[in-house]
Image (spheres, rainbow, N blue to C red):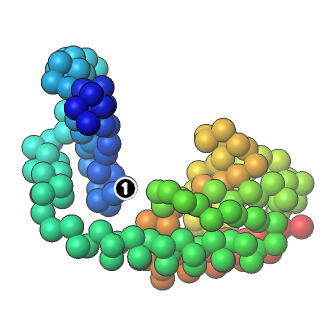
Amino acid sequence: DKAMKAKTIVVNGLSKSYAMTGWRIGFAAGPAEIIKAMTTIQSQSTSNPTSIAQKAAVEALTGPQDFIQTMRTEFDRRRRFLIGELNAIPGMHCLTPTGAFYAFPNASALYGKSSGGKTISSSSDIALYLLEQAQVALVHGGAFGDDRHIRLSYATSVEEIKKGVGRIKEAVQRLS
């Protein structure tokens, strides 16, 4: 419908859909006069992607797309594995995420537990404890608006996820 096309703007990125995290490249499509205004503002407020990132984005968008389903299937396998393992750890509860590749388990049942004279009272405490005791880097939930949670990425192999979540489980079991 031409009327809808004239008032529609699409803004998207390639980080998740094409597994191009770190490339920091996105795009906008819409009516020429709006895109021109957006370009003017963007060019003065942010840096531009490198020419290599731009070429990679063009190839991602115009090249073969058959790998996308394979990639989605693999991320689903990683997600299901991680969520199952997290939910098996006493004190953690994780809903199945429906987007991106992050799990956001509620770990607030660990509040009040301690190790080495340090008591856990926030998601920052949990993140620091797991970094120091399990060598697992994750992000405290306060950074995402909910201090009861922690955020983990499953953008790695199942083997690495298995190692990391195993170390998390061992560290949590040491809390008293």
Q: Secondary structure at mark 1?
A: loop
Q: Is residue 118 visible?
A: no
Q: Quadrant of residue 21?
A: bottom left
Nearer to me, 49 or 65: 65
Q: Residue at x 29, y 51 (%)?
A: 14
Amino acid identity at mark 1: Lys
Q: How many marks?
A: 1
Relative placement, left or right, of 162 versus 106 is left
Compared to residue 43, the image places residue 155 above or below, namely below
Q: Which x, y percent locates residue 2?
A: 22, 32
Residue at 50% x, 57% y is 99
Which residue is disc 1 drawn over?
Answer: 16
Neighbour class for label 1 at 10 Å: few (<14), some, many (≥20)? few
Q: Residue at x 12, y 57 (%)?
A: 62
Which residue is at a point 75% across and 64% down the rendered structure image?
93
Res 36 quadrant in image: top left
Q: Position of residue 44 (x, y in %)?
A: 23, 17
Q: Is residue 62 visible?
A: yes
Residue sitting nearer the eye, 118 or 74 = 74
Residue 37 in the image: state x and y as whole percent.
21, 17
